[in-house]
Image: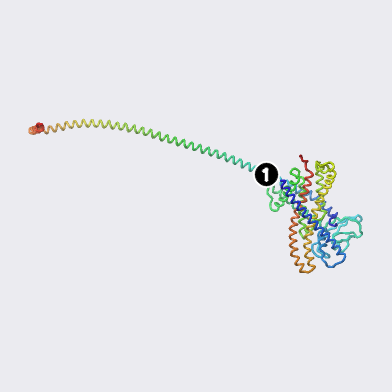
Amino acid sequence: MTNKVNRFKSILLFFIFLFTALSVSAYENIENDGKASADSTQEPKKEGFNAGKLVMNHIADSHEWHIFGSEENPVSIPLPIIIYNKVNGWSLFLSSNFEHGKAAYKGYTYVEGKIHSEDGSGFYDFSITKNVLSLLISLTIILLVFITVAKAYDRNKNKAPKGWLGAVELIIIFVRDDIAKAAIGEKHYARFMPFLLTIFFFIWVNNLLGLIPIFPGGANVTGNIAVPIVLAVFTLVITLASSNKNYWRHIFAMPGVPIFVLPIISLLEFVGIFLKPFVLIVRLFANILAGHIVLLVFFCLIFVAGQASTGAGLGASVPAVAFTIFINCLELLVGFLQAFVFTFLSAIYFGMAIAEPEHH
Amino acid sequence: MELVTPDIGLLVWMLLSFTIVLFILKKFAWKPILNMLNEREKFITDSLESAERAKKEMKALQSDNERILTEARAERDLLLKDAREIREKMISEAKGLANKEGERLLKTARENIQNEKMAAITELKNQVAVLSIEIAEKILKAELSSDEKQKSLVKNLLQDVNLN
């Protein structure tokens, strides 16, 4: 059992390092690209293809759901804009009023996916953006799927599930046995199950939706920092709420540690409380973001080469598409893996919070 | 830097919608699903256990049956053997009795025959004696019917005597 867990942990660590390294390097590249694009916009270069800008537009949140077409005249789904301004109060209108950034409306302008007020006054933007809509779609899917599953279970009590319900059950049992029971233990796992199942399926469904290139997929929900932040805050709050005396003793009075080292250890452990969810945030965010970026960059290669000549573009398209397919398959794995890692680490933190003191 | 700055809008929507969905799922999906799973697992374990128990009982029953069957078979064999023995004994007894009776009958028959035979022989002897006398009488009568015959006889007799 311990052997299995150890092997499992080492595999896990390997993947975590691998994807963190991958995502960090990818992110750096994009930052450089972004800077390069910012430089190139200052010295106007007409009709040039800007890969960095395209990638950033795709991974960033937006107030309209772009489907196809040029930047100036795209075919896109307009989304509702909800703004609270301390002076003007609430305003609610459709983003189509901005005419893709060409027009100002109610004292607001729309530039590069962001809303700015014309007079420079402060406001809060609670709009249903692309990410919010995608989030709502994914949550609706999750609700529909699992309430259907629950109803199906109610109908055939004590019978084997049929069809796709079997697949869903397989994953639910995987979360229960290989995540919750393995990390928290037989005694206390049950009360953390609803949260663990919810974050697992939430992250997974959103990761998969993000890989679908057209509406209602393609948004970068789990790769947007706000979403992992909320999830990790949930993990932190639940960890702290369910923590017992033993947990705090291990932080502020680690047994078996000499008194003069204790302040340092305690400080580190205290920082660790917040560092753990922070790492969760960064891992999920960076991995999914990096996945989207890498996919888009491979596609952009075609057009970057195409700028040199049409032949080069056609030639580049073959390896580029092959690479994109490969990365897409990898992202399918990463999508599951990140859902699993986030859930598993959350479960481990819960397990630490409720651990009973060991008797040596 | 823009990428790592969370938007307040998405943050609020995420917090709100995720919390609501978490509670709805907890109440209407996870609880029934997990309960049902546990219940089914329990049901399966119980069923397996009872099946195992039934199998054991069946086995015990079967061995009991077999024991009874072998006992019955042994008893039957014993009965058959006894019967056979009795039969053989009866037959041999009957045979002995019959033999004895036969012998007795034979013996009496033989004795009777002997007696009858003796009687017959005595009778015959008497008859023969009477007949012999009668015949001798008749022959004598015939032989000595005339004087010449009487003389020749005497002569013959005398010739036989001769002088030896």
Residue A150 appears in view = no
Q: Position of residue B89 (x, y in %)?
A: 42, 34
Colouring rule applied to residues:
rainbow
Viewport quadrant of the C terminus of chain A? top right
Q: Is residue A250 above or below residue A11?
A: above
Q: Judge by depth and name the residue closer to the eye, B105 or A244.
A: A244
The residue to which callout 1 is attached is B45
Q: Is residue B136 left or right of residue A199?
A: left
Q: Is residue A121 above or below residue B134?
A: below
Q: Is residue A331 above or below residue A73?
A: above
Q: Chain of mark 1?
A: B
Q: Position of residue A38 (x, y in %)?
A: 86, 62
Q: Residues within 10 Å of mark 1 (few under 14, many from 20)?
A: few
Q: Is residue A253 left or right of residue B101?
A: right
Q: Position of residue A204 (x, y in %)?
A: 76, 53
SS for dot 1: helix
Tag count in the figure?
Answer: 1
Residue A318 appears in view = yes
- Give the residue type that dot 1 points to: Thr
Q: Judge by depth and name the residue closer to the eye, B26 or A256.
A: A256
